[in-house]
Image (spheres, rainbow, N blue to C red):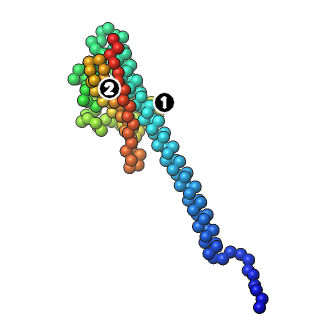
Amino acid sequence: MKNKHHSGFTLVETLVAISVLLLSVTGAFSAARNGIISATYSKDQVIAFYLAAEAVEEIRNIRDTNGLNPSHPGWLTGIAAQASDPCYFGKVCTIDIVNTDVNGNPTIATCSGGSGTCPVLKLDPTYGFYGYSAGWKDTIFNREIKLKQINADEVSILVSVIWKKGVVNRTFNIRENIFNWQ
C-alpha cells in the first residue's frame, strides 16, 4: 500500500488559526477603545479641575479686594456678607468670570432651587472662555459653589463641577477654607 501524504491545512487547523487571529484583533481593538475612553475622561477631569479652581480663585480675589478697599463694610461683601448675597450660607451659587458687573467684579448669582439647579456652563467658540453668555455653546459642565461659615473669620468654600458622559454622572470637588486676614 502506498501512503499518500497530503500537504496543507485541515479544516480544524484553519478554524483554530482564524480564531486565534480574531482574538488578537479583538484584544487590540478593545485596548484602543479603553484608551480612548480613558483619554476622554482625563480631558474632562482636567477641565473640571480648572473650572473648580477658577471659582475658588475668584472668591479669594473678591475677599482680597474687599480687604484692600476701606469702603467695603466686610470681607465677604458681595459674596456672603448678608442673607441677600448670592452665596449666603446655605445657598448654591455660580460665578461668571467673563461677564462682570459695572465695577469689574465677576457676576455671582444664586441658583434657583438649590443643588443641581445651576445653569450649564457655556463655551466661547472664539476664545475658549467658560461662562454664561447667551450666544455661546452649551458644554457638559455645571459648576456649583457652596459656602459654609466655620466662624466669624473663616469660611469653607466647596466648588463642585458636575458633568455627564454617556450614562455616567461625574463630579469633581474642591474644598478650601478662606480667612479674614485683616
Looking at the figure, which quarter contains the C terminus? top left
Say if 57 sits above or below 22 in the image.
above
Q: In this rendering, is residue 83 above or below 10?
A: above
According to the picture, the residue beneath numbered tag 2 turns out to be 156
The residue closer to the viewer here, 105 or 52, is 52
- Choose top left, top right, bottom left or bottom right for residue 62: top left
Q: Which mark is residue 82?
A: none
x and y, in percent, of residue 25 in the image: 59, 59
Between the C-alphas of marks 2 and 1, the distance is: 32 Å
Q: Residue at x 41, y 49 (%)?
A: 166
- Of pointers 2 and 1, the one earlier in the residue sequence: 1
The residue lying at 77 percent from left, 89 percent from top is: 2
**SS at badge 1:** loop
Q: Is residue 82 visible?
A: yes
Q: Nearer the viewer, mark 2 or mark 1?
A: 2
- Say if 43 sits above or below 100 in the image: below
Relative placement, left or right, of 83 versus 15 is left
Is residue 90 toward the left or the right of residue 26 in the image? Answer: left
* Quarter assignment of residue 147: top left
| Amino acid carrying mark 2 in the image | Ser
Please state, as top left, top right, bottom left or bottom right, where the N terminus lies in the image: bottom right
* Label 2–label 1 contact, CB within 8 A: no
Could you tell me residue 41's position as x and y percent? 46, 43
4 relative to 156 in the view: left or right = right
**The residue positioned farthest toward the right in the image shown:** 2
State the residue in front, 56 or 78: 56
Q: Any mark on residue 127, and which?
A: 1
Residue type, mark 1 in image = Tyr
**Dot 1: few (<14), some (14–19), or many (≥20) neighbours within 10 Å?**
few
Q: Which residue sits at x=25%, y=26%?
A: 89
